[in-house]
Image (cartoon, rainbow, N blue to C red):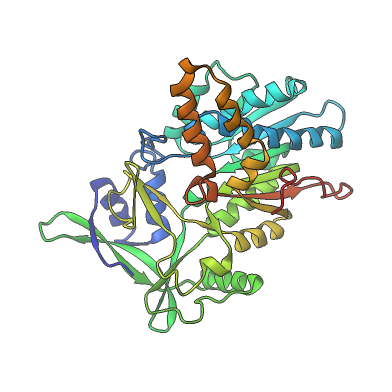
Amino acid sequence: MDSSVAACPAWLAHHLQQAGGVVPFSRFMDWALNDPGHGYYGSGRARIGVEGDFVTSPSLGSDFAALLAEQVGRWLTRLIAESPPGAPLSLVECGPGSGQLAMDLARELLLLHPDLAGRLDLRLVELNPGMREQQQSLLEGVMPIPVQWCSLDDLKLEPVRGVVLAHELLDALPVERLIWSGGELSRQGVKLLESADGTPALTGVSMPLPDDLRAEALGMAEACGFSLPPLGAPAGWTTEWHGDAFRCIDQMASGLSHGLVLVIDYALEARRYYTARRDQGTLMAYRHQQSGADPLAKAGQQDLTAHLCIDTLQVAARRSGLSPGQVMRQGEALLALGLADRLHGLQQLAPADLPQALQRREALLRLVDPVCLGEFRWLTFLQTDADKPITGWEIVSAPC
């Protein structure tokens, strides 16, 4: 476990003092990202795009939304065929970020499927007030379909028929960090201390692993067929545990009466995630387009993210009543949806449009770059009526 010391801002020191001076890493991560006044997302400080702290697929231009709309449109068309005449449909985005993807996707869907007008609405699930203000500022008065902000609890009260999208959401939910030390698993904590110059500071510490968390982790590992820790794990081996992601999937399942959940995120199979060679897990920090491995540094000023485990997420989905579907790399999915045709079409632009063509070409190539955005995984989870077939909900027609 990294025992380095990082500066602690006053607002976080206050939280830690109120909590007794030591908290689990998951609590620290939640504060660092979601504190309403000072958290990276909660305060609206997050800046996404080439001029911000990190790049997402939607921030590179509207081509990503146009390609995704090809797929989402097929699923919505399928839903129309399986729904009562005139039944409303919803596109739900959980964790909409800046709101750019929601805006571009709604516009592209109506271009492809004009019959969705008057039948489709947009539900945005955003818990952080700072990010909600960004989204409202962008979307106010420009959306071609009705839009409303809600919570997953709201959806649970009145489940919708439609598509639920979680794009780069689950990897930013707080995680537990598990440590193999002294022949047993423990829980990483974050402790408040006083630095040499008398200012508050943070450091990582080991905490006992609660019985319920131990039972959840070991039970899930057994269900997925891997060991915690893995064979040959060295002392100090550290990994992440995604209990909040499992609970979020359960909430999504409860809010969807018929349709599909699409998760787009960095994710790994359990055999690659929980391996002795990956001895520091996947947790990363992002600021000013630079990645770092110190999650305690600059609390509230940097993004924190951890890869998902595909196998454990699928087991959690099954337990919530969802049927796991395909898992595809983003590069494969976007190429199957027509990205190559878009690249070819850039050759038809007039010479005066060359700067735009070059910019779009770079963006399209980044979307499928196998060492970056192209390595994102698209994971589908189906919620269907008992008498409805589960076939025909594939991501395009490409192989897994």
Question: Is residue 137 at least partly visible in the picture?
Answer: no
The relative height of residue 97 versus residue 176 in the rendered view (above or below) is above
Q: Residue 5 versus residue 255: which sits nearer the camera?
A: 5
Q: Residue visible at 54% across and 51% down?
A: 375
Q: Residue visible at 82% across and 49% down?
A: 391
**Residue 343 image offset from top left, x and y in percent:** 57, 32
Question: Is residue 93 at least partly visible in the picture?
Answer: yes
**Residue 191 image offset from top left, x and y in percent:** 29, 63
**Residue 209 image offset from top left, x and y in percent:** 45, 72
Horizontal arrangement in the rendering, residue 203 relative to residue 208 (left or right): left
Tell which residue pokes out farthest to the left in this image. Answer: 197
Q: Residue 86 versus residue 263: which sits nearer the camera?
A: 263
The relative height of residue 219 versus residue 58 in the rendered view (above or below) is below
Q: Residue 22 versus residue 1: which sits nearer the camera?
A: 1
Q: Residue visible at 38% across and 71% down?
A: 207
Tell which residue pokes out farthest to the right in this image. Answer: 387
Q: Quadrant of the C terminus?
A: bottom right
Tell which residue pokes out farthest to the bottom in this image. Answer: 183
**Residue 218 image offset from top left, x and y in percent:** 57, 74
Q: How many marks?
A: 0
The relative height of residue 310 versus residue 330 in the rendered view (above or below) is below
Q: Quadrant of the N terminus?
A: bottom left
Which quarter of the picture shows residue 27?
bottom left
Horizontal arrangement in the rendering, residue 103 relative to residue 280 (left or right): right
Horizontal arrangement in the rendering, residue 297 relative to residue 222 (left or right): left
Q: Residue 313 versus residue 32: which sits nearer the camera?
A: 313
